[in-house]
Structures are given as C-alpha cells and as structure tokens.
Amino acid sequence: MPGTPLIQGLKIFSTCPPSNRVPQAEYLQRVQDIARWSEQAGCEGILVYTDNSLLDPWLVSQVIINATRKLSPLVAIQPAYMHPYSAAKMVATLAYLHGRRLHLNMVAGGFRNDLIALNDPTPHDERYDRLVEYTTIIKALLRGSDALTYEGRYYRIANLKLTPPLAPPLMPGVFVSGSSDAGMAAARKLSATAVQYPRPPSEYTPVDAHTAGDKGIRIGIIAREHDHEAWHVARTRFPEDRKGQITHQLAMKVSDSSWHKQLSELGTTPASSENPYWLVPFQNYKTFCPYLVGSYDRVADEVSRYVEAGYRTFILDVPASPEEMQHIGEVFERAVCAFAIG
C-alpha cells in the first residue's frame, strides 16, 4: 500500500487483534507487528476493542503508540468503565507524553451479561442519551482552559479542570455506532463519525457528498488479481466451524447491539463472484464485520459504491499480514481512481 496518496479523501483504520483471540505469549508482539504494518500501509489509525473479556484498551493503545511514529489508536470507551474525567485525563496524558492524537470510539452497548455484571440496567436507547452527555463532558474538558460545570441527567460536575491541557491539534476524533436510530441521533448531536456495519453495496444509492454527513463502515477485504484466488484465501482463512457457529448463536442471545442483529439477518444469499459480500467469518464467530471478497477490480467497484453512498471512513478488520495490507491497498487505489473523491 503506497501510503497517503491511496487514502486521499478517505480515512482508513485497521483493527488491533482482541486479546482473547491470540495466545498470551504472542499477544504483545502481535499488537506491535500489526500496528507497524498498519502505519506502513498508510492507515490513519487502528481500532482497539473493549469489553469485559479483553485487556484494557488504554494500555494496549500505549503499546501501539510506542511501536509506531504517528498511528492513532481509536480507543473504544464504555461509560460504564470510567468517569468521563478519567477518559479525558487518559487522552490528555497520552498526548502530553507522546505528542500523539487519539480517536475515541464511544461504545453505548455490549453484551447484556457484561452490563449486568457491572450493575448497568440502562435500556438501549437511554444508553445513547447517556453517551451524549459523557462525550460532551470529555470534549468540553479537552477543549476548555477554564473549569467546567455541567448539570445533566446522568452526570453532574462542578468547577472541574483538566490538567495537563490538551494541545488543540491533538483534539481527538469521535466515532459512535450508527446502526440504530438512537446511535445515529447521538452521532449527529456530537458531530461524530457514525460507524455502521454495512449491508451489501447494491442496496445503497449515491448521495450528494455535501449532504452525506460524516459516516464510516466496518469491513474486511480479501482481494487478489482473480476471483478464484481471493476465494481460496478467504475460505482457507475462515473455514466454516460448527463450534464457532454455536458461539455466534449464543452471543446473539446476550447482545442487544443493533448491528449484531442486523448482520445476523443478512447473508442468506451465498457469496460468489457476482455477490462478493460475505458473512461467513461473522457467522462463525471469527470476526465482527462483513467481508468483501473477489478480484481487485470487483472489490474496488464495491468499495466505490460505498463511497458513492457517502462513506468516507473505512475501519478494516484485523490484518493477516503486511502482504495482505498491500492487496487491500491495491483495492483502494483502484476504487479511488474509479471515483473522484472530494
């Protein structure tokens, strides 16, 4: 992937491997390697997951920062885990120590069992109302030089000041899941990037770039010169697995995330060279997003359709190798050539 010319007009992120999918003895090196591959490929940042079963995303982000020169961790933040002041303090501290900008992936939902364990019975849509307050406080603390007083439904603070202050160029970008109406409304209120788990590209229609809003998608890509090569790689990397299918079904029962339900309702049409949208990795609990599989040109055409539909941010799945990043780069180069991105 040649780097910045590739992503002209687009923001591209990779994903850090979740700690429960890699042996402990290998995990630290794996995170460092993937962070370096992502930076060398020209990615702007890298998503770091959070839930009760995973390592702390802030400490994992510290590893990423130490392993790279400019890659920006996209840190998943769940309000149930920490006060907004603590989250703002983390952003400011990492910026102060490393001069590095972060991005924040604001998480309202999760597995019901995780939330119950944390004594958080808040209904789905109300969690987005709380998320708006939470994120508003973080942004105000990071932007303000004066002490902050805030009176909300979920949070109240008085004369709170953040030290050290954050340099304005390091103000984080904010991402919010936009798979539900409540999520989309929260993203609009926060002027955040609304991230979705997309339907097949054929289901979208082109939009005016000036009215599209700030939207992104989570997607995996496997592409080669010819369709059959890509499909061989895809089916070898993500074979169907009965144990994984059962785990996926169990996860569905304990998740109230809109995106999880929406993806699970798709995928009834088998993927092929005519239909490169592939959900087998998701259905077998190998990953958490759809895949596009096929030749460079075929997948580039699908990516172009998403761009035409107004998506300018792409959060890619965990990369398998630096060579795989090069294949993905070829797709984006061809997609950019096919669509003039303003």
Image (tube, helix red, strand yellow):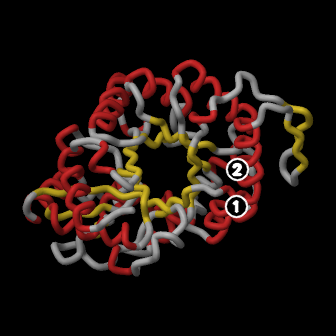
Other-residue count near label 2 (Cα within 10 Å), few / some / many at <14 / 14–19 / ≥20: few
Residue 311 visible (yes or no) = yes
Considering only vertical position in the picture, is 284 above or below 211?
Answer: above
Residue 51 visible (yes or no) = no
Residue at x 72% of width, y 57% of height: 127
State which quarter of the image contains the C terminus.
Answer: bottom left
Q: Amino acid at mark 2?
A: Ile
Residue 28 horizontal/vertical position (percent) = 38, 24
Nearer to me, 84 or 17: 84
Residue 101 horizontal/vertical position (percent) = 53, 33
Residue 315 horizontal/vertical position (percent) = 41, 52
Identify the mark nearer the N-term, 2 or 1.
2
How many numbered marks have been drawn onto this rendered protein structure?
2
Say what secondary structure mark 1 lies in: helix
Whole-number angstrom distance, CA of label 2 to CA of label 1: 27 Å
Q: Give the residue at mark 1.
A: 189
Residue 95 falls left or right of residue 128:
left
Q: Give the residue at mark 2.
A: 116
Residue 131 horizontal/vertical position (percent) = 71, 53
Nearer to me, 281 or 315: 315
Considering only vertical position in the picture, is 170 above or below 5?
Answer: above
